[in-house]
Amino acid sequence: MNRAIDKLFRIFQNANFSISVSDELNTYLTERKFDGQYFYSYIQKFVVRRMIEDPNGWLVWIPVGEGLTNPAVKVDAEPVLIMSDQIKVLEPGLLTWQSMDEHSPVMSNGKSQMTGLVYYSLTDTQFLKHTQIGQAIDKRFETVVIYQHDMGAIPGVILGGDLTDEHFFDSYFSAFVPFANEAIRQYSDWTAVMTTSAFPYREEIAENCNGKGCRDGIVYNHETEEHDTCGICKGTGRVISRSPFGVFLREKANPALGVDGDVNGPMIRFISPDVSIIEYSGQAWQTLLKKAEESLHLNVIDESQSGVAKMIDREDSFSQLTKISNNIFDEIIFKSLLFIEKYRNVTEPMNPVIVKPISFSMKTEDDLIDELNKLTDKNAPIAFLVESTKDLARKRFSGNKSISRMVEVLVSYDPIYHLNTKDKQMLLAAGSIKRDDLIRSLFAYKTLTSITAEFGTEFLEKPLGEIFAELDKRIQPIIDSYVTAQLIQTA
């Protein structure tokens, strides 16, 4: 299950989607952490997992901070993940849930005890707290309005899944459960079989006990007609001849003296049981587990499959990921950003703009290089080459945000940035580009590196227009010097 949830993170590849929010909200999200995580990390780490585990739960955004009591300060928004069994009232315009971490003092058996119930409610206009008071048996509550949000809707969203006929949600991973339960049962049986039948049995040659009066482990007292267990063989009637060092002792066979035995036979041997049942049982639970994983349609496609089978599997995988992605972006992320925006900007909130993922394939660095080479060989439009170069930069420099950003700036500034010097010169000779374009392309990287060293990596976060203006300003003298040198040479 954990492995399947991890595979959902391909939905959040940076190259797959884009989100635009107001400048104020963008600044707020870059500075504010929710349960120790920034907004998008919080959605990935906590919300997606809860969505799979409890699709009928809710993610609500409640107001907190100084803004609750000081109108001059904006309230902060805080997420609360509500389990479905915490919800006590759910109807249009009202959501009430029990707080599992808070209790109020109530009277019970003449003593004050911290066992009172605490509930919270969100309506279309208010955020309220209900605290149990008085006698515990009375179930009386005191209601306090914490904040008047006036959004016209409950600032929360149901986590969601596959809608059933009863208007509840099944988890997107519900198909996993039947196979997983069978796999667990079969695995339990397999461990039992392993315990009883996986290891060899040891057989040792035993001799009759020669203890005084011992007869099949019982020592009889003929005088008292009582009997007792033999202390030598412990009631078994058999003993194993073994030295203090664990060496088995065998008397030499001598029929004349009454000593029988096979001199050549082993004193001890091990009997291995049939392992076919163990192998079958082990294969059974592994097969069931594989079927459980395949039912989610999230496994990586096997490259050895035929073209038709591979296409069918990719269609199932794409359909499943698209369904989950639509819920995450259209419902959870969009509404969450909108509610935070309305908390922070009461007068003129701006709706977020989301471009959802259209591809969920996890491309390796080699895949991206091959794609870029093919686009170049086929003379694809510049826009495709630029975006492929950006994807490659994000992959190669995923741990270095500043270098990745530099490449994004350069491919946007210089359309022929991705070409080598020889190809650029060929374009110049063919008249496809001008000399100024070539000089600008050759010196763009060096110039941007110099600017970044001067102003710091914060410079790269400025709007592209400002960065391009600074690059033009620095590169223009270089272009002018080449033109001047050419004029002198011509003269």
Image (cartoon, rainbow, N blue to C red):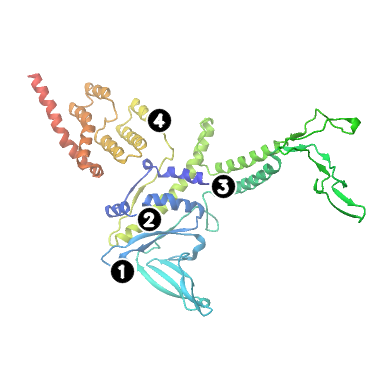
Which label belongs to residue 245? none
Image label count: 4
Mark 4 or mark 1: name the one nearer the start of the chain: 1
Which label belongs to residue 34? 2
Distance Cα–Cα, label 4 vs label 2: 36 Å
- Callout 1 crowding tier (Cα within 10 Å): few <14, some 14–19, many ≥20: few
Question: Which amino acid lies under the numbered mark 1 shown in the image of this protein?
Answer: Thr
In this view, the residue farthest toward the top is 490
Task: Note whether 274 is above or below 188 in the view shown.
Answer: above
Q: Quadrant of residue 266?
A: top right
Which label belongs to residue 69? 1
Q: Are marks 4 and 2 in contact (CB under 8 Å)?
A: no
Distance Cα–Cα, label 1 vs label 3: 48 Å
Mark 2 or mark 3: name the one nearer the start of the chain: 2
SS under mark 4: helix
SS under mark 2: loop
Question: Which amino acid lies under the numbered mark 3 shown in the image of this protein?
Answer: Phe
SS under mark 3: helix
Q: Position of residue 210 (x, y in %)?
A: 85, 42
Label 3 sits on residue: 176
Question: Which amino acid lies under the numbered mark 4 shown in the image of this protein?
Answer: Asp
Which quadrant is home to the C terminus?
Answer: top left
Task: Note whether 111 is above or below 476 in the view shown.
Answer: below
Q: Are marks 1 and 3 in contact (CB under 8 Å)?
A: no
Q: Quadrant of residue 76?
A: bottom left
Select label 3 or label 4 by which is in front.
4
Instruction: Please name whichever residue, 225 or 379, is drawn nearer the observer in this view of the structure.
Output: 225
Q: Position of residue 482 (x, y in %)?
A: 14, 26
Distance Cα–Cα, label 2 vs label 3: 31 Å
